[in-house]
Image (cartoon, rainbow, N blue to C red):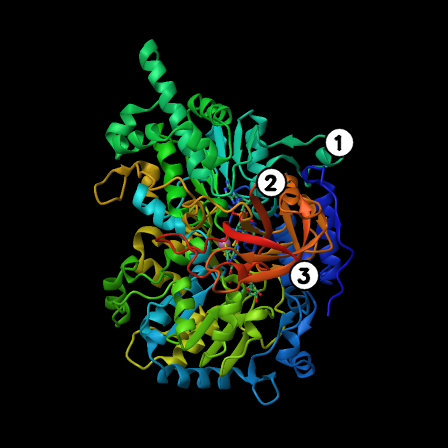
Amino acid sequence: MLIHPKTHFQPYTHASGGWGSAKSVMQILWREQALIKAPVALLKQNKPDGFACVSCAWAKPGRPHALEFCENGAKATAWELTSMKTDPAFFAAHTLSELRDWPDYALEQQGRLTHPLRYDPQSDRYRETSWDEAYQAIGVQLKAMEPDSVVFYASGRASLETSFMYQLFARAYGTNNLPDSSNMCHESTSVGLQESIGVPVGTVTLDDFEHTDCLFFFGQNVGSNSPRMLHQLQDVRRRDVPIITFNPLRERGLERFVNPQSPSEMLTPESTLISTQYHQVAIGGDTAAITGIAKALLEMDDCATERGTPAVLDYDFIATHTEGFEAFTTYVRDCTWAQLEHKSGLTRGALEAAATVYASSQRVMFVYGMGLTQHRHGVANVQMLVNLMLMRGNIGKPGAGICPVRGHSNVQGQRTVGITEDPKKVPADLIERHFGFKVPAQKGLCTVDACEGILQGQVRGFIGLGGNFLRAIPDTSRMEPAWQGLELNVQVATKLNRTHLLPARNMWLLPCLGRIEIDRQKGVAQTYTTEDSTGCIHGWHGSAEPVGPQVRAEASIVAGLAMAALAPGNRIDWQAWSDDYSTVRTAIGTIYPQIFHDMETRMAEPGGFHRPIAAAQREWLTPTGKAQFITPVTLAEDDDVNLAEPARDVLQLMTLRSNDQFNTTIYGYDDRFRGVSGTREVIFMHCNDIVRLGFKVGEQVLLTTAIEPEVKRQVGPFEIIAYDIPEGCAAAYYPECNPLVPLWHHAERSKVPAAKSVPVRLSSAGG
Ligand SMILES: Nc1nc2c(c(=O)[nH]1)N[C@H]1C(S)=C(S)[C@@H](COP(=O)(O)OP(=O)(O)OC[C@H]3O[C@@H](n4cnc5c(=O)[nH]c(N)nc54)[C@H](O)[C@@H]3O)O[C@H]1N2
Ligand SMILES: Nc1nc2c(c(=O)[nH]1)N[C@H]1C(S)=C(S)[C@@H](COP(=O)(O)OP(=O)(O)OC[C@H]3O[C@@H](n4cnc5c(=O)[nH]c(N)nc54)[C@H](O)[C@@H]3O)O[C@H]1N2
Ligand SMILES: [Mo]
């Protein structure tokens, strides 16, 4: 279907941002034929009188820059405001079996969904239907199903208002089956931080960047995935604040940056050095690396005691605020440097260098992303980072704290308003009192559990509020056939994707407004709210005309489904809620008064308002009221591989995003910063591994999962690229590699798929 442009690999030597970024934005505006609507919208992006970017969840400043968007935010806007459409004529022309052969890129490239559609098995096509038909038929089906056999998935974009309605819908229907994209993303953070410091979210705000005197960066690719943060990093670097990075790859955005919105920078060879130390840690080597830094700190502290100089550790903080210090330090002292060097792939000297800067800084921030969370020991990685912070009291003071960089633009907020499979995390009594129904007591299914339920046939129905579930989850080749046994599949989406193409027995595809579009209810443009990575809540409204008259707002679709599916008896006025979102906000304020009181006025303040975060005030909402040092159980990142002596022909594969995608949405085939153009079917390897394993640069290889050999998990052919990556490690793109990730290969306790460490073997695709 799609002819790939010519494949090309050439290392990228420019800074991130700069002219490359400006050119890339123009290309996508042109291609999406969005040159008329998008530039106007871009001026409103992340502005107090505008809309929240649909790309990442990075914080939006109260005093925005003239253009408060980045290359990838602009791509996301163009993607949503495209003038191309997938209307009923498109679906009349193509069967689903035909569309299943199209690549992800080509599917979304066709444009926006414009009409409610129902799958017709006879013709294997989607056919236009009416909203009434869809609601009524789905309602009848849901009423006939066992509530716990239905899953209500959310992808992390829907507003606080829609999300609040959605979780109430699921619970009033009778289930806590509310998995969301966070289950594949920062759930390791939510589990880890809750235990360590008593809150499930980060503790920093944008102001902290102005006070910090050192930043540590673990496994987060700022240049591609949260580029607006580069402004804060550039400011920090102008104050000469050191940035210490741990990442197996030398990511361009973590090396150098040219602000594409600064004429003086664009016209001169100036660029800002971002990382002052860059440590290419082995995949999964972070716990060992942090243990090494902790060990170096303890050794420095011992020296200080001997010499009678000031202590390196903050003993006052440790004594007043923490528990578990003794056990933790015993563990760290018992680890040998040889072990730590071996597991981290870094030298003692490198770890001591990081420790030296840490020890001489008074206010340190710790930023991290999927490089820590998507591992078998993802929770332990996060907790190890906290241990390091606690050693010097780097939490609960200006300029210090922990900063998990969230993914989807409202993924953190969805949790705040009740999208979680765990009923203990919602105020069940308040919900019962105000809405007249009981929150089901039985714990629901998270994403991995939902997949298991689908495989085993216990999950019979699936409602998707956005996202591309089948493409985002692991074990694609096992999940796709099982998915087709579903009784009911309802997808609310803006664009066509692969999850919409594998038919369940009854299937509807319901088109919704994107959040850049003006959402008018009863003639009044509605305001909506989101929460960003720093716990800041803002009000927004759309700026562009909707793509078509048939497309409905997500809140209105949730209300339509709820009214059709719920038996009478609860006290929710769904119609009133979907007619006027301020009434939903009042309800949110009633159920979560501490966070959302007076929401209507507070959300309109420039910069929004912050939810209270106890740990940031040194109040620890843990069972004992103290912050916890939590000793890791093992230094090995992946027990499946490392416990035994790892086989020499097995590489540890991380699955990554390119600079030209948003999750499963592929904008194009170029990964400018990594120097790849024209293809995504590549594997990045160390040149020594290529030679050692008997391959050649440019050779086509198949990748096979090296654990659980009785199940064949394979992708390829992929072209080998020689790359600056630690030996024994490899990288390739998500979602192409998802068939390689076994469903059970997930983080302990958080169940986040271990997408950053998949043991693989390579074989020549030539046979
Ligand atoms: N443009 C764009 N923006 C996005 C997204 C997108 O797809 N495109 N996705 C959004 C979403 S949902 C999310 S969750 C975020 C994701 O943003 P990130 O958290 O940056 O996720 P990844 O792109 O998967 O990259 C993870 C980084 O971790 C590194 N890494 C991998 N394994 C390890 C390891 O073991 N240790 C260390 N220290 N580093 C490691 C990789 O080299 C890579 O630089 O971005 C959000 N923003
Ligand atoms: N191997 C591997 N797997 C991974 C990851 C990885 O790094 N490696 N990352 C994981 C992570 S961090 C995440 S967050 C998940 C992402 O998983 P998902 O959130 O499920 O996937 P997305 O690709 O973000 O979803 C894209 C689709 O959302 C729909 N959409 C876009 N905007 C809107 C909107 O405004 N409303 C509605 N209703 N629909 C909309 C469009 O139809 C689009 O096709 O993937 C996970 N899977
Ligand atoms: Mo994510």
Closest to the observer: 96 or 766? 766
Circles 2 and 3: CB distance less than 8 Å? no
Crowding near pointer 2: few (<14 within 10 Å), some, many (20+)?
many
Name the residue type under label 2.
Answer: Ile
In the image, residue 117 lies at what x, y percent?
Answer: 57, 81
- Pick out the residue farthest to the top: 307
Depth order, front residue of 556/649: 649
**Looking at numbered disc 3 in the image, what kind of residue is underneath it?**
Gly
Q: CA distance from mark 1 to mark 3?
A: 51 Å
Nearest to N terminus: mark 2 or mark 3: 2
Mark 3 — residue? Answer: 767
Q: Which mark is residue 268?
A: 1
Answer with mark 1 or mark 2, whichever residue precedes in sequence: 1
Q: Which mark is residue 725?
A: 2
Crowding around mark 1 (Cα neighbors within 10 Å: few <14, some 14 to 19, many 20+) is few
- Quadrant where the N terminus is found in the figure: bottom right
